[in-house]
Amino acid sequence: MLKDESRPEQQRTRQLLAVCVALSGVVGAMALGFQMGSDRALYMQASSVSVGQTTKPIVITAHWNAAPKSSSSSFPTASVEQYEATRTVPNHNGPLGTLPQESTTILPMVFVGSLITAAMALFYRLVNPHKEATHNLQPIDIEWAMATTSEEKKTTMPGIAPRPAGYKHDVTPGYQLEEVSRPRRNRRSPVIRSFMRETHMTPANFICPMFIHDDDFDEPISAMPGLNRLCAASVLKEVGEHVAEGVNTFILFPKIPDELKTPDGRQCYDETDIVMRTIKMIKAAYPNVIICTDVALDPYNSDGHDGIVDEFTGEIINDITVEQLCKQAVCQARAGADIVAPSDMQDGRIGAIRDALDNEGFTGVGIMAYTAKYASAYYGPFRTALDSNPSFGDKSTYQMDPANSREALRELELDESEGADILMVKPGLPYLDIIALLKQNSSLPIAAYHVSGEYSMIKAAAAAGYIDEEKVVLETLLSFRRAGADVILTYYSKQAAKWMNDPDGVWQKRSEGSFEPQMVSGRHDGIHCYCLSQCCSLLTALNMRPSSFLTGLH
């Protein structure tokens, strides 16, 4: 908005006038005091009333006056007429008589009092409402925000196409719904929307999945743009960057060389395995971060399944698989893992792993159970990253049917009773209803896995220019929280945290209810704008940001 260059000069003129009026009031007050003192002295001298004397009225023919008692009067004995003649105060005629001479000072008193009152009012009106703000409000212009509106000052809102000359809406004049409940009242400004927001999310809600391998270089994952299999040095660098953004929890997924894979996956509990070495390395550099580990055989199994396969029937043998998983979990806990996460979906494995950990003294190590892990087509990029595709068939004999929801409640009851500390749903976005279902039926924390297929789809659509990547990612992650997830495993952990921490980003503006310039409504009048200016001054005096509050007044 262009500012009026004459405004500072006008302000100085008003201030000078206010000072002059105030000085006039002071002079009037001094004159009033002097006059009152002089009149009182004259009156006392004229009446010559000694201490202890009393007076009473002497009424003579519709006249009244005060005279001392004859017994104690210092005046000579004389007639009433002679006594009145010696007085400096004349007789007062009229039905009730008129006031004494001393009372004639009432008129200048009224005049001076009025002058003082007017001076005070004018001083307050000229100085206080137009006091210049000493603060710098961003991003609003106080002059613009306080401007009263009129038909001549209305301008088109930026971004709205100007209406043709003479255009009028083809609507009934004055039409209004008889609607009492209007939900839009709670959405009408950024501040109110922030105040009413039910779901909140921070980088602390994220778990970062990291793909690791034993090479001394990073290897890009073709199916997951922007992600790599990380070498040891890059793992530490990645952890440090996440911690700087507020993400402090990680889960490790190893890419195992083919020569170390066996039908029983025995490499998974080797003390020299890459997972155990990586846990120790991270903990040495960042002792306060939380390390989760994947408990499953598929990265180590030569058949690519989460359990030991019967070579004759192709069945995944449940119980001996669980035995291997217990060995793996104990080995990971011994290396320093804080939470083990069995993703195999074998029956009874949570209770068995809990017992194995407790028997080895790892009672403080938590279990994040993959409670509702569905046999999903969204895992494709992940299996490419780990080179762990099944050599035959699929995993539908142990992972859940995507058509089922009540079955998730049965898995929930089993995992809770067997000692799970966190319950996970995987995948996340297509199964928001399952996240909500578990949240409603359990007091345990709920985790949601934003899986590789979901990540790669967003990346592909963003690369093609179909979507705004930042907005879509943050909306997707927020949907997990809204559905009931307490923690989210996401490959966007670092980037999402950066977006959320950016003070000029979409997330911060939305979360803080930052001011969005809007046209001043025709409902504003001088009083409204005056109140607005006073609010600005008060908020600034309290070291608060007026811009965070003013929007709600529009």
Image: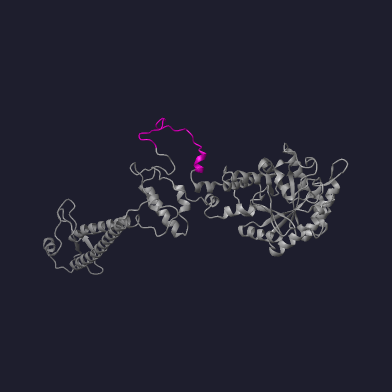
- Of residue 8 and residue 228, the one placed in the foreground of this image is 228
Q: Residue at x 71, y 44 (%)?
A: 380
- Please tell me whether residue 438 is drawn above or below residue 290 in the rendered image: above
Q: Is residue 330 left or right of residue 541?
A: right
The spot of residue 67 in percent (x, y) is 19, 62
- Of residue 431 and residue 256, the one placed in the foreground of this image is 256
| Residue segment shown in magenta | 163-187
The spot of residue 172 in percent (x, y) is 41, 30
Whether the magenta-drawn stretch holds residue 164 is answered as: yes
- Please tell me whether residue 269 is drawn above or below residue 481 in the rendered image: below
Main SS, magenta residues = loop
- Of residue 345 and residue 423, the one placed in the foreground of this image is 345
Residue 240 visible to the viewer? yes
The part of the image, by quadrant, that contains residue 113 is bottom left
The spot of residue 440 in percent (x, y) is 68, 43
Q: Is residue 264 left or right of residue 78?
A: right
Q: Is residue 89 left or right of residue 170?
A: left
Q: Is residue 302 left or right of residue 553?
A: right
Whether the magenta-drawn stretch holds residue 83 is answered as: no
Question: How is the protein colored in the picture?
Answer: one colour
- Please tell me whether residue 276 is drawn above or below residue 525 in the rendered image: below
Q: Residue at x 56, y 45 (%)?
A: 468
